Image: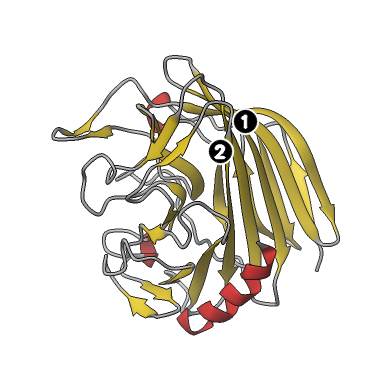
């Protein structure tokens, strides 16, 4: 089967025959409160089963898979309220926008669908914080799995150093979310988190450092499980990352490079991150095999 890529002025889809594997919305119509940003949703397995959730009522700024940063200096590119030390979460006029500037590449070659575009990060007050070049690819791994890669290079467009952090770097214990964030379907709640060292549930693995982590969840209506695996590139800052991962209340995976330590980007300099994500009609026992197939892509 050969992948196909179709694109409009606001979104693109990658399909495998009649199955839409992913839809990347790069010009969202998101309210400012939710920090408008490109997102990938829906995400499907090769069998057509959805493994993402868009704008859940409990956290409306969660959108499938998105590159979301809650602490960018004093700005919030995550959405909603900002965590303030000794105050908790406070809604502020600081929900910024990741604005699409232009498409660089949109092509399928050698059975790999590639999309690259340029963005700029604009604070709610109108200040340009970063310029960004972002690239995504999709390719088939085998009859049961496909792979998404996500790569970003962000250049500080201000005249000062920008510190990228998390609620934990601002004082909230074990809440170091930020980065490439996946939100799973409601039916995936209470699923199984998987690492090379073992498995866990709830928040048991949160804050641990791993090269990769997976999530096995089950679908309503059909007697089937699916697996999502995320792999962190060895070149990423603070590799292997601490993970913001959970199965209680909702399903989430997030290799969080800013979990407990800021990444500081001087004026005019760039910081880069690369990730591979596997989506499979499989279970926890296949996670290591999927991770092995993703690692060479980085």
2 or 1: tag closer to the N-terminus: 2
Residue 154 seen in this snapshot? yes
Residue at numbered disc 2: 38
User: Mark 2, mark 1: which one is toward the viewer?
Assistant: 1
Q: Which color mode does the image show? A: secondary structure
Identify which residue is drawn at 38% across, 29% down.
73
Left or right side of 210 for 246: left
Identify which residue is drawn at 68% across, 64% down.
297
Residue 185 seen in this snapshot? no
Give coordinates of residue 135: x percent, y percent. 68, 45
- Front-lying residue, 122 or 50: 122
Q: Do the residues labelled 2 and 1 touch (CB within 8 Å)?
A: yes
- Secondary structure, mark 1, is strand
Identify which residue is drawn at 65% across, 64% down.
147
Residue at numbered disc 1: 119
Left or right side of 171 for 131: right
Left or right side of 153 for 106: right
- Front-lying residue, 35 or 218: 35
Q: Using the image, tell me which numbered label, if any, was put on residue 91.
A: none
Alpha carbon of mark 2 to alpha carbon of mark 1: how far? Answer: 10 Å
**Residue density around tag 1, few if under 14, some if 14–19, many if 20 or more, within 10 Å:** many
Q: Which corner quadrant of the image does residue 90 belong to?
A: top left
Give coordinates of residue 273: x percent, y percent. 57, 49
- Secondary structure, mark 2, is loop
């Amino acid at each position: 089967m050969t992948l196909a890529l179709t694109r409009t002025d606001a979104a693109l889809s990658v399909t495998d025959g009649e199955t839409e594997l992913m839809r990347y919305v790069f010009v969202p119509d998101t309210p400012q409160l939710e920090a408008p940003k490109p997102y990938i949703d829906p995400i499907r397995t090769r069998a057509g089963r959805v493994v993402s959730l868009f704008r859940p009522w409990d956290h409306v700024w969660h959108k499938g898979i998105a590159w979301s940063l809650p602490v960018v200096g004093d700005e919030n590119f995550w959405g909603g309220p900002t965590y303030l030390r000794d105050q908790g979460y406070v809604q502020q006029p600081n929900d910024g926008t990741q604005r699409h500037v232009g498409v660089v590449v949109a092509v399928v070659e050698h059975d790999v669908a590639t999309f690259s575009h340029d963005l700029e990060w604009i604070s709610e007050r109108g200040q340009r914080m970063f310029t960004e070049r972002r690239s995504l690819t999709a390719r088939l791994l085998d009859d049961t799995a496909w792979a998404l890669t996500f790569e970003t290079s962000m250049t500080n467009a201000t005249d000062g150093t920008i510190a990228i952090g998390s609620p934990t770097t601002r004082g909230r214990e074990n809440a170091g979310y930020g980065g490439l964030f996946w939100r799973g379907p409601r039916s995936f709640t209470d699923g199984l988190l998987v690492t090379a060292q073992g498995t866990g549930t709830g928040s048991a693995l949160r804050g641990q450092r791993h090269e990769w982590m997976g999530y096995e969840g089950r679908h309503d209506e059909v007697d089937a499980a699916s697996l999502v695996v995320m792999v962190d590139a060895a070149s990423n800052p603070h590799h292997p990352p601490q993970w913001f991962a959970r199965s209680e209340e909702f399903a989430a995976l997030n290799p969080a490079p800013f979990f407990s330590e800021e990444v500081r980007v001087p004026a005019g300099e760039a910081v880069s991150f690369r990730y591979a994500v596997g989506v499979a009609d499989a279970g926890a026992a296949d996670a290591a095999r999927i991770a092995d197939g993703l690692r060479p892509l980085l």
